[in-house]
Amino acid sequence: MTAISARNLSKRFGHVVAVNDVTFEVEPRELLAIVGPSGCGKSTLLRCLNGLEMFDAGGVNVGDAGVSRAAISGHRAFERAVHPLRQRTGMVFQGFNLFGHLTVLQNVMLALRVVKKMPLRQAEQVAHEQLARVGLGDRAGYRPQQLSGGQQQRAAIARALATNPSVMLYDEPTSALDPTLVREVLLTMRRLHDEGVTQLIVTHEMRFAREAADRIMLLDAGKIAALMPTAEFFSHRGNAHIEKFLEPFRGVA
């Protein structure tokens, strides 16, 4: 069974087609890097995959949970239908979105207590385990503002991991960070990949994509311009979309 898939997925904002008939599958344990020029639909695609955006056509499957837009009428019905998708995905955003009045431990525990209705002691144990997993075991009692940007993003990753998702989705997780802090977040995602966590990462970090991703998806104007193994992507010749996109990175990535 594929970990996550989309079939003929489309999303419009008025006259703008942000995601245009996108179809792909991601296998368990795979790390897929989603790249492309700004405004090409990368973030919108990610938000469609876990139902944060109500897509206009097509369908999404996460493990054994699936949603087909053709079978749904209205926003309320869509929200009900995508609930199983959200339970199976963890989302990490550009901003850290941590609550400043809570400790790091309490931030990680929040979804476990409120959404999962997990008993306090069990939620504390899970939160401690996930913080240790991302290298923040000694920061559980800190407030977010006491952490570096890289540490805050790792805390956000721990929070997403705490609900035991089948798939992790990242929307530009390093874009808000100082360059000196980017590496610690990327190393965390590489370690999760080594552990077998399925991950889809929207990123501009082409060096990371080249080193860590199993495959690369290139989006252009909302459509898949290329989807192939990483080594093939970076050595590919003859695809104008790939060559144009990679030109600024030659000698860097």
Image (cartoon, helix red, strand yellow):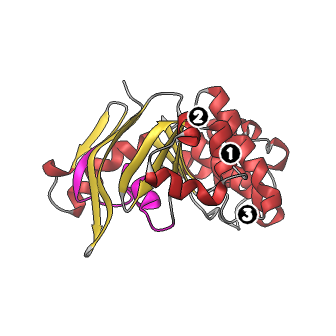
Which residue is the extreme one toward the front? Answer: 238
The three-letter amino acid code for the residue at tag 2 is Ala
Front one among 114 and 130: 130
| SS assignment at label 2 | helix
| Residue on which disc 3 sits | 177
| Residue on which disc 1 sits | 208
Front one among 46 and 37: 37
Boundaries of the magenta span:
38-59
The three-letter amino acid code for the residue at tag 1 is Phe
Disc ID at residue 231:
2
Asked where in the image residue 25 lies, by quadrant, the reply is top left
- N-terminal label among 2 and 1: 1
The residue located at (74%, 42%) in the rendering is 187
Closer to the camera: disc 2 or disc 1?
2
Q: Is residue 12 left or right of residue 183?
A: left
> What is the CA distance from the residue labelled 3 to the residue labelled 2?
27 Å
The three-letter amino acid code for the residue at tag 3 is Leu
Give the image location of residue 21, x and y in percent: 26, 52
Give the image location of residue 163, x and y in percent: 54, 40
Front one among 225 and 38: 225
Front one among 208 and 119: 208
> What is the CA distance from the residue labelled 1 to the residue labelled 3?
15 Å
- N-terminal label among 3 and 2: 3
- Is any part of residue 119 visible from this angle? no
